[in-house]
Image (spheres, rainbow, N blue to C red):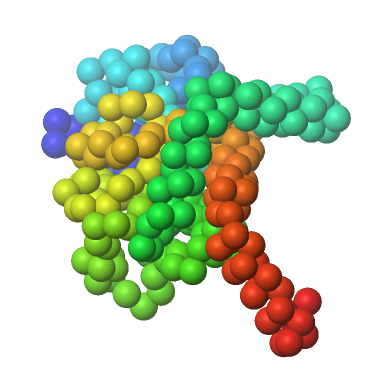
Amino acid sequence: MADDLTGSYIARIRAVLHALHPSERKLAETILSFPGEIASYSATELAQLANVSNATVTRFVRRLGYGSFDEARQAARAAQQAGAAVFRTPVDAAGPEAALAAQIAQGRLNVENSFAALSLAEVDAIADAMLGADRVWVLGFRTAQAFAVYLGAQLGQVLPNVTLLPQAGQTLAESLCSIRAGDVVVVFGLRRTVRPFAAVCRELGRGPARCALVTDIAPGQGADAAGFAPEWRMRVQTTAPGVLFNHAAVLALCHLLATRVLERSGPAGRKRLLAVESLHDSLDEL
């Protein structure tokens, strides 16, 4: 029954698809082809798009377990905010040049707005904590792992003990139990996070290590909802004019963190860099 339906509105459509009347099925197939449209269209506009009546739209959303079309549209908007590309509608730009200009402008704005909320003193405090740590752990899932890999590789030029999480061939528990007092954990919490993310953050919050969170999720959601209260919280903006998030600010922040670690590492950092370059020469790697 509709009252028993749960999950995203797309999951609800798939659950009842086999039992729909022909006109409702036509509407369902239209939405499944363009799942982001329901978030921006009115009931009348959606009916016209699917070539069905307004009454069909009303019956359909009730079959899904929603009290009204507006309630269904709010669920669709929530799915868009969660970050799935399939739910995000591309902006109709006036040609490829305009589309390129929009992407560049948004990337610049994301960097400016993100760094406006940060101070160099805060970045330096994180850099100093990493320099003084026994081990630095860098954690990221899905898209966020790409930035965790990048930051870890840059830090590894100066810091001898940098570990990326999750590690291939290990469970999260096997890695998390190795985090000790004196360690620093940098957590990337970027949309869309995986289900274990909240539990991982909860365990990190209970642990002894100092933590820094890089996130594009609004306060009160994501890691915050799990009760995770890191020592440092850096909010980045990833707004984009298209279907994919713009991560220019995330990469810029990674670059700044790694740069400040290198610059503040002093003689020890330079000694390690020289040792690395000496090995490059010996191994003829570069």
Q: How many marks?
A: 0
Q: Is residue 227 left or right of residue 37?
A: left
Q: Residue at x 36, y 63 (%)?
A: 134
Q: Quadrant of the N terminus?
A: top left
Q: Residue at x 79, y 32 (%)?
A: 100
Q: Is residue 25 visible?
A: no
Q: Quadrant of the C terminus?
A: bottom right
Check the image and report above or below for 230 versus 154.
Answer: above
Q: Residue at x 34, y 15 (%)?
A: 70
Residue 270 image offset from top left, x and y in percent: 64, 62
Towards the viewer: 76 or 31: 76
Residue 46 image offset from top left, x and y in percent: 49, 20
State the residue lying farthest toward the bottom. 283
Towards the viewer: 270 or 169: 270
Residue 224 image offset from top left, x and y in percent: 27, 34
Q: Residue at x 49, y 69 (%)?
A: 160
Q: Is residue 257 left or right of residue 210?
A: right
Towards the viewer: 229 or 84: 229
Image quadrant of residue 82?
Answer: top left
Residue 243 image offset from top left, x and y in percent: 59, 36
Check the image and report above or below for 40 versus 3.
Answer: above
Q: Is residue 280 left or right of residue 29?
A: right
Q: Is residue 128 visible?
A: yes
